[in-house]
Amino acid sequence: MIKKEDVFGKLPEMSRVLTIEDREQVLDEMKVRAYRKNEPIYSEGDVPSHLLCLLSGKVKIYKDGVGGRAQIVRVINAVEYFGYRAAFAEENYVTAAAAFEPSVIASIPIGLVRQLITRNPQLAWFFMHRLAVALGRSDARTVNLTQKHIRGRLAESILFLKESYGTDEDGMTLTVYPSREDMANLSNMTTSNAIRTLSAFVQEELITLDGRKIKILDEPALQKISRMG
Amino acid sequence: MIKKEDVFGKLPEMSRVLTIEDREQVLDEMKVRAYRKNEPIYSEGDVPSHLLCLLSGKVKIYKDGVGGRAQIVRVINAVEYFGYRAAFAEENYVTAAAAFEPSVIASIPIGLVRQLITRNPQLAWFFMHRLAVALGRSDARTVNLTQKHIRGRLAESILFLKESYGTDEDGMTLTVYPSREDMANLSNMTTSNAIRTLSAFVQEELITLDGRKIKILDEPALQKISRMG
DNA sequence: AGTTTTTTATGTTTTACAGCACAAAGATAC
DNA sequence: GTATCTTTGTGCTGTAAAACATAAAAAACT
C-alpha cells in the first residue's frame, strides 16, 4: 500500500512552493496507482483530466502514425510530471503514454492544478519552463529524425536513452531495456533495420548486446555517427 | 514612422490584462523595427533577450540540419508572439527566424516579460497555453514529416500554409508566396522534388501555380493525400 | 512438458527519394 | 542593355531504406 503522505514530498516544485492549505488539498485530491509493464496510461484522443507524476518506473510518450507505425516522441523518468500538455492546450491528447516497465503514477485533477498555478507564480513558471524545454527538444528531434540517416538516428537514440535514464554503476550499461521495436519507434525506422543496425554496431564494437541490455563501448564514436547523420 | 502608442493596443493579451503601470512600462521599454524580406531576425545559438511580436508580415522559424538543409519548424502570422521559447527554457535559441516577407516586429525585454508574468496569472496562463499548443503541433509535425511520403508531406505543407496564413477572398489562393526551396524546407524534401511534386499536383488539377502563387483547386483530394501519406 | 505467440535475426527484392547534371527563365547587378 | 546570379524545371543514376519472406530463438500460455 502506497501512503499519499509519503508521496507528496516527492512531487517536484509543489512540495517546495505550495502553501499549507494547498498542500492539504493536493493530498486530498491526489490518487496513486501502479501500472504494469507496457500498460497504457492514456491514449490519443482521450480527454486529459489529471496532471500525472511518474513516481517510479519509466514511461514512453508516443504517437501512432501512418500504417500503425508508432513514433516515440518523449520518454519520462521518475520523478517527473507528464500528461499536462493537452490539458494546458485545452485539447484532447494527441499522443499516447505507456509504461516502459512497472511504474507508479500519482494523478492530480487538472482543475486543481490550474488553480494552484493561478495562485502561485513560481509553479506557473516551473511548468512554463518545462514546456519551453520540451518544445525545444521536440523541434530538434523533428530535424534529427528527418535529416539523419539510419545509423545516425539509431546512435542518437542510444545516447538519448543514456541521457534520459542513465546507466549502471559501470557508466556504460543502459538502465532501460527497450525491445528492438522500441528502438525502431524511437529512431524512426522499421524493426528489421533497428535489429540490423544494432548488429552492425556490435560488429564495429561500438556497443554490446545481451538480450535487451545495451552496453555502450565507444561513446565518442556513437556521438560522431549521430552528429554526421 | 511607427507610433508605439498605436502598437501597444495590438499586443495580444497584454493590451487586455495589464495594469496601467505595467502598460506604461511596456510602452517605455518596447522597441519596434521593420525587417526586409528574407532578413534574419535571430540565429541559432543567439542569446534570447526579447519577447518578439510580429505586428505585420510573415515569419518562418527554421532549423539548419545535416548538410546545410533547413527545416521550417513553425511559421508566425501577425499578430503573434514568438522568440520566447528559448528565454522561457533559459537556453540559447535552437532555431533561427527570418522574415518571409517585409515585416514589422515589436520587442519587449524578456526580463520585463518575466516580471509581468509573475505579477499576472492571466498572462502566465496565456503563454503556457501557447507553448502547450506549439508542443502538440511540433510532436504531430515530427510524425508527419518522418512517416509520410513526399506527396503526403507536400500536400500537408500546402494545407498548413492555408491554415497558417489563410487565403485571398476567393478562399483558394494562398496569401503567402513561398519559393520552391521554402516548400522543400517545409516538407522535408529536396528542392528538385518539391518542384517535381508541385508540377505533378498541377497535372492532377489539385492546384494551379502562377510563379510562387499557389491556388488550391481540390482541397479534399489534398487532405486525402496528406492523410494517406 | 508441449503448444502457441512474440521477438529477434538474416537474406532478397523493390522503390522512393537523394544526388547529380544541365538548361531555361527570371531577377539583380553593373 | 548586357552580364551575372538565382530560381525553376527535367531527365538520369545510384542507393538507402522499406517491404517481403522465412526461420530461429525466446517468452508466454495451457
Image: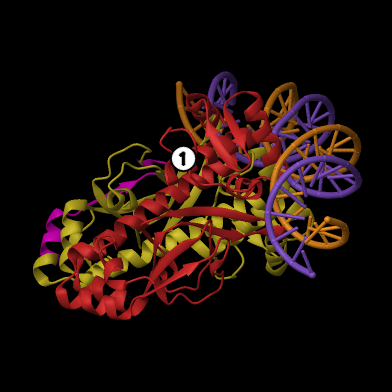
Chain colours: A yellow, B red, C purple, D orange
Q: Where residue A82 sits: x, y (%)?
A: 35, 55
Residue A173 x, y percent position in the rendering: 60, 62
Figure quadrant of residue B200: top right
Residue extending furthest toward the left: A21
Instruction: Write down the region rendered in magenta.
Output: A23-41
- In front: A20, or A119? A119
Query: On the rendered image, what quadrant is the C terminus of chain B found in?
Result: top right
Residue at the image position 32 percent from the left and 72 percent from the top? B3
* Residue at 44%, 39% in the rendered image: B167
Between residue B152 and residue A8, name the one nearer to us. Answer: B152
Q: Residue B66: horizontal and vertical position, in percent?
A: 69, 58
Q: Total number of numbered labels? A: 1
Q: Is residue A100 visible?
A: no
Parent chain of label 1: B
Left or right of residue B174: residue A16: left
| Magenta-span inclusion, residue A26 | yes
Question: Quadrant of the image for the N terminus of chain B?
Answer: bottom left
- Give the residue at mark 1: B162
| Circle 1 Cα neighbour tier, 10 Å, few/some/many (<14 / 14–19 / ≥20) | many
Q: Residue at x 44, y 46 (%)?
A: B165
Question: Percent from the top left, x then y, of residue B6?
Answer: 28, 67
Specify whether residue A2 is in view. Answer: yes
Above or below, C21 against B90 in this view is: above
Say if the magenta span includes residue A193.
Answer: no
- Up the image or down, A12 lies above or below B56; here it is below
Residue D12 vertical placement versus A229 (above, below): above
From the viewer's perspective, tell me whether residue A29 is left or right of residue A103. Answer: left
Residue at horizontal 44 percent and vertical 59 percent from the top: A135
The type of residue carrying mark 1 is Lys
Q: Identify the secondary structure beneath mark 1.
A: helix
